[in-house]
Image (cartoon, grey):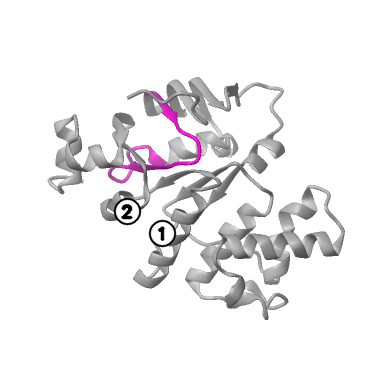
Amino acid sequence: MVINNPKVETEALNFYYGATQALFDVSIRIPEKKVTALIGPSGCGKSTFLRMFNRLNDIITGTHHKGRVLVDGEEIYNNHVNLVELRKKVGMVFQKSNPFPKSVFENVAYGPKIHGIKESSKLMEIVERSLKAAALWDEVKDRLSSNALGLSGGQQQRLCIARALAVEPEILLMDEPASALDPKSTSRIEDLIGELRKNYTIVIVTHNMQQAARVSDYTAFFYEGNMIEFDTTEKMFTNPGNQQTEDYITGRFG
């Protein structure tokens, strides 16, 4: 499958936790303003791979990699890359919602403040825009000064998405963003992903096959650190090119 002008790309990527290899020669070209799902059994390397795109694995002692990781054609593991700017461009939403123990407003305004925006009217504009983009504004507009920890689990996760959007990223990484949520909140997150794909390149790790089928345009199947197959989601779920992919998707293992 040919992906021209990928937003994110890896070339023969190998990753190691000390002497233990976690990723093996992964090469992928991820298209812009589409949703790409990473699927596979627990421990297969999905989250490790996701964290390569904003260099979060760097904070783990003893890790190293071989191969290339490119965003907009630029190798992001060069020494001259500004990590603050990279993580502004490549936002992250984690499996467990992690709002700061601050007000709803301060949670969303945190990133813009770090990047030098101090004017209160500008911050308010960013907070409102980000909360609207995260489909949360109507629920919290009268509670902006309230502690974010008082929100429901689903609201907290959407707040974390708003916080990521506030610094205007181009890429949004989501590591099982709905796995800890109830079905209704999960549905809200999935609907939100459908809206966000218009403006952002999204890469999502999910254990939920139905969720991957619902929200993604492309799917990559990982197994034991190898990327077994990558294709359009429709083809992967209806006519996979690899027997191992079919066995996993149909529930024969995993």
| CB within 8 Å, label 1 to label 2 | yes
The residue at which mark 1 appears reads as 190
Say what amino acid the circle numbered 2 marks: Arg
Residue at 59% x, 22% y: name it.
Answer: 75
- How far across and how far down the image is residue 86, in percent? 65, 36
Q: Nearer the viewer, residue 71 or 138?
A: 138
| Above or below 139: residue 180 | above
Which quadrant of the structure image shows residue 150?
A: bottom right
Secondary structure under the numbered disc 2 in the rendered image: helix
40 in the magenta segment: yes
Which segment is the magenta one?
A: 25-46
Q: Residues within 10 Å of mark 1 (few under 14, many from 20)?
A: some
Q: Nearer the viewer, residue 120 or 75?
A: 120
The residue at which mark 2 appears reads as 214
37 in the magenta segment: yes
Q: How many marks?
A: 2
Say what amino acid the circle numbered 1 marks: Glu
- How far across and how far down the image is residue 185, in percent? 42, 69
Q: Residues within 10 Å of mark 2 (few under 14, many from 20)?
A: some
Residue at 46% x, 24% y: name it.
Answer: 10
Residue reaching furthest bottom?
Answer: 142
